[in-house]
């Protein structure tokens, strides 16, 4: 496991190598609990679902969706939108770990990852109810809420997971909140712990 972590994170930049103290861990856990309890309220929703992150996520979602639909891969056509949104940012996060000084990109990328999980969770939780307007209705269609089913209905139904849409949605939303808390803490940690990274890539 140690060797695998070293290959993924050769410069020991991820949160796994943070020097966690009792109070910092407690504060982060408290922030996570608070964020999960208030995930649908204005502050958290505004932080994770806003115009600045909406456009890149939207473009990735729609391009992936239309590309795979054109190939006739029906289930993956629906699943590819949120999947590619998340995988692209996850790949960027892992790639930055392999760059010396890549930690300075991690708070932004971790936050971005959180926005993709949060957005997916909101729509996953709506898979049965279909009360939300579709993402594409903002720019490309005029479908009203409930007029047609969203992607997550067609993702979960063949897997027999449709009855668990709210649970799955909450897991994804809480994952987004976790990324938000981690991004904010990482920003502070990298700013205040320069000495930890003076000898990047060496085991302490």
Image (cartoon, helix red, strand yellow):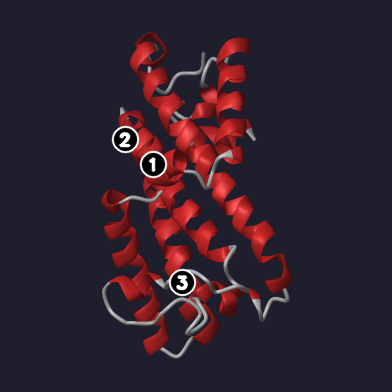
Tag 3, which secondary structure?
A: helix
Q: Position of residue 71 (x, y in %)?
A: 40, 88
Labels 3 & 1 near each other (Cβ < 8 A): no
Q: Residue at x 34, y 75 (%)?
A: 137
Q: Which mark is residue 80?
A: 3
Q: Which residue is mark 2?
A: 105
User: 103 above or below 118?
Assistant: above
Between the residue at mark 2 and the residue at mark 1, the CA separation in whole angstroms equals 18 Å
- Side (left or right) of 87 relative to 160: left
Earlier in the chain: of badge 3 and badge 1, it is 1
The answer to whether residue 24 is visible is: yes
Say whether residue 98 is visible: no
Percent position of residue 98, x then y: 38, 37
Q: In which quadrant of the rendered image does the N terminus lie? A: top right
**Is label 2 in contact with label 1 (beta carbons under 8 Å)?**
no
Name the residue carrying label 1: 47
Q: What residue do we see at 37% from left, 68% from top?
A: 61
Above or below 84: residue 192: above
| Sequence-first tag of 3 and 2 | 3
Badge 2 local density, few (<14 within 10 Å), some, or many (20+)? some
Between marks 3 and 2, how big is the CA–CA gap? 25 Å
Which numbered disc, 2 or 1, marks the residue that appears first in the sequence?
A: 1
Task: Give the residue drawn at x 66%, y 61%.
Answer: 166
Instruction: Please give the name of the residue rendered at 62% of the width and 18% of the height, measured from the top-left corner.
Output: 26
């Amino acid at each position: 496991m140690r060797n695998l972590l070293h290959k993924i994170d050769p410069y020991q930049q991820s949160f796994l190598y943070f020097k966690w103290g009792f109070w910092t861990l407690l504060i982060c856990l408290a922030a996570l609990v608070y964020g999960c309890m208030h995930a649908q309220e204005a502050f958290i929703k505004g932080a994770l679902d806003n115009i600045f992150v909406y456009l890149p996520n939207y473009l990735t979602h729609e391009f992936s969706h239309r590309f795979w639909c054109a190939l006739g891969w029906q289930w993956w056509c629906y699943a590819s939108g949120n999947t590619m949104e998340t995988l692209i940012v996850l790949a960027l996060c892992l790639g930055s770990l392999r760059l010396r000084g890549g930690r300075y990109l991690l708070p932004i990328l971790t936050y971005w990852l959180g926005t993709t999980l949060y957005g997916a969770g909101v729509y996953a939780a709506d898979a049965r109810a279909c009360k939300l307007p579709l993402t594409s209705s903002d720019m490309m269609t005029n479908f009203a809420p409930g007029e047609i089913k969203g992607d997550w209905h067609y993702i979960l139904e063949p897997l027999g997971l449709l009855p668990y849409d709210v649970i799955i949605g909450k897991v994804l939303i809480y994952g987004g909140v976790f990324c938000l808390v981690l991004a904010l803490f990482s920003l502070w940690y990298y700013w205040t712990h320069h000495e930890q990274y003076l000898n990047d890539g060496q085991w302490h």
